[in-house]
Image: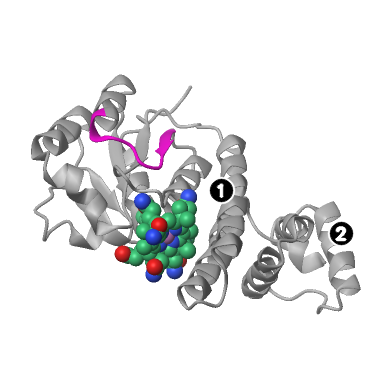
Amino acid sequence: MRARVEEGIPPRQAARLAIERREAGLPFDGPHTLEAPRLAADLKASCLAFDEDRALEIIRRAGAVMRPTEIMRSVVLVAVAEIGRDWEAGLVTVAQEHFASHLARRFGDRLMDLYRPSSGASPVLCACAPGEQHDLGLLAVAIELRSRGFPVVYLGADVPVDAVLASAASTSAGLAVIGCTLDEHLDAYVSAPEAVARLEAASGAPVLWAGPAAGRVSALSLQGHRAETIDAAVAYAAALAGKRSTPRA
Ligand code: B12
């Protein structure tokens, strides 16, 4: 328990965790980096059983050893990705995959509400490309940025190009992050290069193409930066937003 407290976990949470671990027959004080795969596996099993109470309990337990952003990245999204791989392999049903995705979405929404901006940077506008429904990765990027104090305007899945342009202008966004998983969802931007140029001019920064389809942007002659992983997208957006922050009095 002392090791947990030294890691910064409040004593009452550390004590609760120690009791839970003893009851679960787990080693008393293992390093929490070893916890994430186990928690992700437990969460996956709970989702496959549609056991919502158990899934929420696992997330609550994770809160005793990890920061909320770590829970999202190392437990919740790992469980979703693994269920996704099993779904591709025909091992789990679409209902089980949807159950897990919705649980991730609800947890992500809670985290978005948890963190409030503390820097005076221009907001980072996060929107999926038109037609794109895969928004959990973009949500993870938004949460990470918010947890670091940066303001984020999150528009979610399937956002028309015009709507992105209008909101970038009305919010004085400092960066537009366009999430894209399926290559074809970049088509709307490929056929509107003037919109990309206007977006860059409005924010004063290159568009950040983010997600699995970002690797295609050069071949598609789309201007801007690209980030295929959550870490790369957060690093780029945070560095840019940090440069533009005006410290608050
Ligand atoms: C959940 C899911 C859905 C959900 C999305 C829910 C939501 N709100 O996001 C729903 C049910 C809506 C869906 C629909 C479809 N899906 Co789907 N889906 C998935 C699934 C199972 C998980 C994706 C996910 O969110 N993973 C969580 C992420 C964050 O974790 P990760 O995958 O480890 O991510 C790493 C990187 O990939 C990257 N990353 C991933 N996303 C992002 C986003 C950003 C912004 C950044 C920076 C990084 C990033 O960062 C992570 C590492 O740092 C995958 C299967 C899989 N194995 O991934 C298929 C998958 C992505 N889907 C696929 C398909 C084909 C579809 C559909 C066409 C299915 C259909 N016939 O209807 C539709 C298309 C919907 C649309 N118009 O966009 C394919 C895409 C194949 C391709 N590249 O062409 C996949 C790979 C499954 C497959 N092999 O068939 N899907």
Q: Mark 1 — residue?
A: 105
Residue 100 in the image: above or below residue 127: below
Q: Amino acid at mark 1?
A: Arg
Extent of the magenta region:
152-162
Q: Position of residue 139 (x, y in %)?
A: 47, 47
Can see residue 231?
Answer: no
Q: Position of residue 38 (x, y in %)?
A: 67, 74
Q: Mark 2 — residue?
A: 16
Q: Is residue 33 left or right of residue 249?
A: right
Tag 1, which secondary structure? helix
Q: Amino acid at mark 2?
A: Arg
Q: Residue at x 11, y 61 (%)?
A: 219
Spatial CA span between label 1 and label 2: 27 Å
Q: Position of residue 153 (x, y in %)?
A: 41, 32
Question: Is 161 colored magenta in this rendering?
Answer: yes
Badge 1 or badge 2: first in the primary sequence: 2
Q: Is residue 116 left or right of residue 209?
A: right
Q: Is residue 55 left or right of residue 226?
A: right
Toward which corner of the image does residue 16 lie, by quadrant? bottom right
